Image (cartoon, helix red, strand yellow):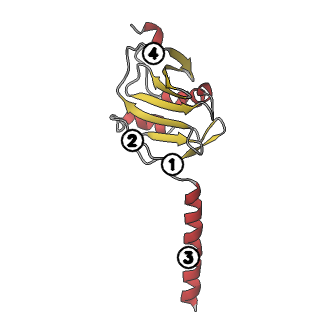
């Protein structure tokens, strides 16, 4: 009888665990080429749990993060650094960001002159780009910039 009771308890715990993990599905992302750079670890450990009103979600790749359900903010650290670009540049969260709006209403922001670079993709239908950059910039600041956008050639 004790065995059946223990099995029932384990079964109930297993169902509860499955139910809880079902609520927080993993976001599938590809790691960036330099994702194993130690500077990315400095960024990832400092990321906030919330970006605006979007909660962090688990991801399946190194040096990545996601917020929102469905995911409305994606982050990947480990891209090749960008030192020169024709893309417009904005400063938010203490970081210079290159702005790629070619996929509007999704915007792609790439940290400028930081090795490695960090990419943030924002669905502007769910959250503003500036809100995401202000929330994530302090973590990205842990990778030192070699120059500012104003010195880009």
Disc 2 residue crowd, few under 14, some 14–19, many 20+, Cα 10 Å: few
Towards the viewer: 79 or 6: 79
Name the front one of labels 3 and 2: 2
Name the front one of labels 1 and 2: 2
Label 2 with label 4: CB-CB less than 8 Å: no
Q: Which mark is first along the chain, 1 or 3? A: 3
**Residue 58 numbered tag:** 1
**Which x, y percent locates residue 153?**
39, 7
Compared with 94, 106 (above or below) is below
- Provide the residue designation for mark 2: 30
**Residue 87 numbered tag:** 4
- Provide the residue designation for mark 3: 11
Distance CA(mark 3)–CA(mark 2): 35 Å
**Which x, y percent locates residue 37?**
35, 35
Q: Is residue 109 visible from the viewing direction of this image?
A: yes
Q: Secondary structure at mark 3?
A: helix
Disc 4 residue crowd, few under 14, some 14–19, many 20+, Cα 10 Å: few
**Which x, y percent locates residue 46?**
52, 37
Label 3 with label 1: CB-CB less than 8 Å: no
Label 1 with label 2: CB-CB less than 8 Å: no
């Amino acid at each position: 009888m004790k065995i059946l009771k223990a099995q029932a308890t384990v079964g109930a715990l297993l169902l509860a665990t499955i139910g809880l993990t079902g609520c927080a599905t993993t976001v599938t992302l590809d790691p960036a080429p330099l994702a194993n750079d130690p500077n990315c670890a400095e960024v990832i450990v400092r990321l906030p749990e919330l970006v605006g009103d979007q909660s962090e979600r688990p991801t399946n790749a190194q040096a990545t993060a996601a917020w929102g359900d469905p995911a409305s903010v994606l982050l990947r650290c480990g891209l090749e650094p960008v030192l020169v670009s024709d893309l417009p540049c904005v400063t938010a969260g203490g970081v210079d960001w290159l702005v790629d709006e070619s996929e509007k209403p999704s915007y792609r922001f790439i940290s400028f002159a930081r090795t490695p670079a960090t990419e943030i993709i924002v669905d502007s239908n769910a959250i503003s780009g500036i809100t995401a950059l202000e929330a994530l910039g302090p973590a990205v600041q842990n990778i030192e910039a070699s120059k500012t956008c104003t010195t880009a050639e």
